[in-house]
Image (tube, grey):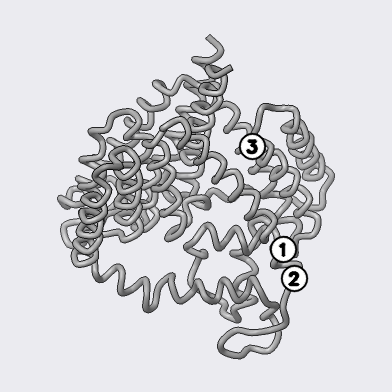
Amino acid sequence: MIIRILSYFAAVCTALLIIAPNIDYTIPVLVNSFTWLYWFMVAALFGMYLLTRKLPVTLKILSVYLFLTCFVSQIPYVSFNAYILIVATFYFFLIYKKCDYKIIFNMIAAAFWLQVFIVTMQLLGFDTLQSFDTHRHNVFLGTVMQYMRFSSLLAILAPLLVLKSKWYIIPIIALAVVSKSSSFGLSVIGGLFVYLSLEYKRYFVFILIATIMAGVGYFLWDRGSFIIAFTVGRVPVWGDVIRTWLMDTSGEFVLPLQGPIEWKSIFFGRGIDSFLPLFPIYKHDAAPFPQAHNCWFQFLWEIGLVGFSLISAYSVNLIRKLYKMRQYLLIGGLTVIAINMFFAFPTRITQTILTIVCFLAYCQKQIEGGELCEK
């Protein structure tokens, strides 16, 4: 009974975020007050209690490391607030591991088909719910109301939907084609390549050729998206992200951005959730290209090589164990998420973060179940 209650609670929380529109999620926090201090200490207490829970060692170390970096962050109050949400996310990970995933899969599928319905109305020009001028301006935004973020949501949903039924790959591919989102398309192509090449090793050459053809075909279909990304979009900004992580560029403004090497930033980052408020300062641009559009680079920027290494160690060990168990579909799903994280920022999108945690917890549950069987 308790498991079913937890399962429905987790499923509803995940689905409610998936369908959430672009509303103001800002929570007013009165920092430097005793009330705020108490709530942070409550979060810190539960953060320390994580060390007694059944978590991979790398995640336990990461939880402590993230707590410590708050104290040396360049904007401590932002990092302390972010840490509260990180602790909550860890506990969702523990809840997901206990859940009945049939309930979660069904709820996520319901959220997916709701998004598909909304998109269909938008593309047909009948979205009188969110946009009253769709007869002149067809859009592809779902309930997220932003093109790239919605495509990222679909990419993150894909691994869980395919676990429910492999037939879901059909609407997923169709949406990738219709959306003309390079990050979504590359995520799906990459995930399919990894899964098929592991599952059908004897046909690797044919799978590789098919993947290359699919990639070239998608590029020709969505060439405009790729051109924008490589000219005035995210790719040129990545150079600025890396330079401002490696160096203190807050001094005199020169191009390309340069300054003294910042060793503290390199190893420990500038602080959890510090990219959005600090990047404009280091880039000398009051309105820079928003977000890093690359979760991996943003990890380096905010928590440095140490934190990035902990995340990488957990990821590699997770894949290694799944490979040993021949869980190739899960590895393919992780590939979809990893590629999308390289071209977008799903770890910073309200609608996707719990879905990522849900899939990771499912992978961990399969590993722990397999280890128990071996014993």
Instruction: Identify the secondary structure beneath mark 2.
Output: helix
Q: Position of residue 299 (x, y in %)?
A: 60, 58
* Kind of residue at disc 2: Trp
* Residue closest to the far right: 34
Q: Which residue is the site of mark 3?
A: 88
Do residues under tags 2 and 1 come within 8 Å of each other at their CB atoms?
A: yes
Q: Are marks 3 and 2 in contact (CB under 8 Å)?
A: no
Residue picked out by circle 2: 263
* 218 relative to 147 in the view: left or right: left
Q: How many marks?
A: 3
Spatial CA distance of label 3 from label 2 is 31 Å
Residue at 50% x, 41% y is: 319
- In this view, the residue in front, 214 or 3, is 214
Q: Secondary structure at mark 1?
A: helix
- Dividing the picture into quadrants, the one containing residue 52 is top right
Check if mark 3's residue and mark 1's residue have beta carbons within 8 Å: no
- Residue 132 visible? The answer is no
Along the line of sight, the residue nearer the viewer: 210 or 179? 210
Give percent across and percent down for residue 316: 55, 46
Q: Amino acid at mark 3?
A: Ala
* Mark number displayed over residue 267: 1
At 33% from the left and 73% from the top, the residue drawn is 228
Question: Looking at the image, which residue is at 64% across and 35% down?
Answer: 56
Image quadrant in which the C terminus is located: top right
Viewer-nearest residue: 106 or 194: 194
Please, what secondary structure does the residue beneath circle 3 have?
A: helix
Relative to 101, residue 64 above or below: below
Which quadrant of the structure image shows residue 172? top left
